[in-house]
């Protein structure tokens, strides 16, 4: 009995050391597992943070690129099916506004940018002004003038960008309206005086004074027509 007790007492320190070592290993393993668990739980957050940063950076880049677009109208072209395209092409064909193609048309099978269109519109407006100033535009209609004004309003910003006289465009259209019938009137006058008498024996005639006055107004609206108005007296 005493021998067994001594043996147990001798072995107890070894058992304690062994248990303590096993306990330390278990604790270390548990701590390691906890750390790994914490790291795994933090990794999505870091990943999310990186993703958010990327999104913010991309958003700033997109905002910067969008800031380069100054007008929605810059994103649109004028296609052959648009009313404006057909309206300008009609003016081009009627008044020869734009040279370049054999028939002076746009060849309406392709789209054109709004700035190209505005350049054509400005050229057409200038051409019509020249025709009216030269009194050769005998076929300019009010419908064409209204079409011009509508086109000017639609493409005012592009005309301004191209350096056109946008601030005076309303006045230019008003000029066209006021001078679509450029009336020129010439006054022609004629005055005839005559004195008549008969001479001879046994003549009882008296001296007669006669006169005739004519005023003629010759008016032209287009330079190719004439309207005569005559007043006669005498």
Image: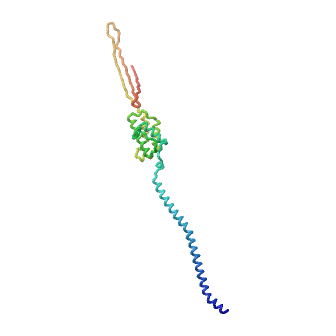
Rendered image quadrant of residue 31: bottom right
Q: Is residue 5 left or right of residue 227?
A: right
Q: Nearer the viewer, residue 33 or 152?
A: 33
| Placement of the C terminus among the 4 image quadrants | top left
The structure residue drawn at horizontal position 47% and vertical position 46%, both measured from the top left corner, is 77
Picture quadrant where residue 126 is located: top left
- Residue positioned most to the bottom: 2
Residue 175 lies, in percent from the top left, at 42, 38
Residue 143 percent location from the top left of the image: 47, 36
Q: Residue at x 38, y 35 (%)?
A: 134
Q: Quadrant of the N terminus?
A: bottom right
Residue 159: percent from left, percent from top: 43, 45
x, y percentage for residue 70?
A: 46, 51
Above or below, 227 against 27 in this view is above
Q: How many marks?
A: 0
Q: Nearer the viewer, residue 186 or 98?
A: 98
Vertical relation: 169 (above or below) 29: above
Of residue 217 and residue 102, the one placed in the foreground of this image is: 102
Q: What residue is shown at x 41% (from left), y 46% (from top)? A: 162
Q: How is the image coloured?
A: rainbow
Q: Is residue 62 left or right of residue 190?
A: right
**Is residue 113 toward the left or the right of residue 10 in the image?**
left
Residue furthest to the left in view is 200
Q: Residue furthest right?
A: 1
């Amino acid at each position: 009995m005493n021998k067994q007790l001594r043996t147990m007492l001798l072995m107890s320190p070894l058992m304690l050391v062994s248990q303590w070592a096993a306990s330390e290993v278990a604790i270390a393993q548990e701590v390691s597992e906890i750390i790994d668990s914490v790291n795994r739980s933090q990794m999505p957050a870091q990943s999310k943070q990186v993703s958010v940063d990327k999104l913010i950076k991309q958003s700033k880049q997109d905002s910067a690129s969008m800031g380069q677009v100054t007008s929605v109208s810059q994103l649109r072209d004028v296609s052959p099916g648009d009313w404006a395209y057909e309206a300008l092409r009609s003016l081009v064909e009627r008044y020869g506004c734009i040279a370049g193609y054999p028939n002076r048309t746009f060849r309406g099978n392709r789209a054109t940018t709004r700035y190209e269109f505005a350049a054509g519109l400005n050229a057409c407006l200038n051409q019509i002004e020249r025709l009216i100033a030269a009194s050769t535009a005998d076929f300019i209609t009010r419908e064409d003038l209204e079409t011009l004004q509508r086109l000017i309003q639609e493409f005012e910003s592009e005309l301004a960008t191209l350096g056109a006289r946008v601030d005076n465009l309303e006045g230019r259209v008003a000029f066209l309206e006021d001078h679509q019938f450029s009336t020129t009137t010439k006054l022609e006058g004629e005055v005839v005086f005559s004195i008549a008498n008969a001479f001879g024996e046994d003549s009882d005639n008296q001296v007669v004074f006669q006169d005739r006055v004519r005023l003629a107004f010759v008016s032209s609206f287009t330079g190719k027509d004439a309207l005569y108005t005559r007043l006669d007296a005498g």
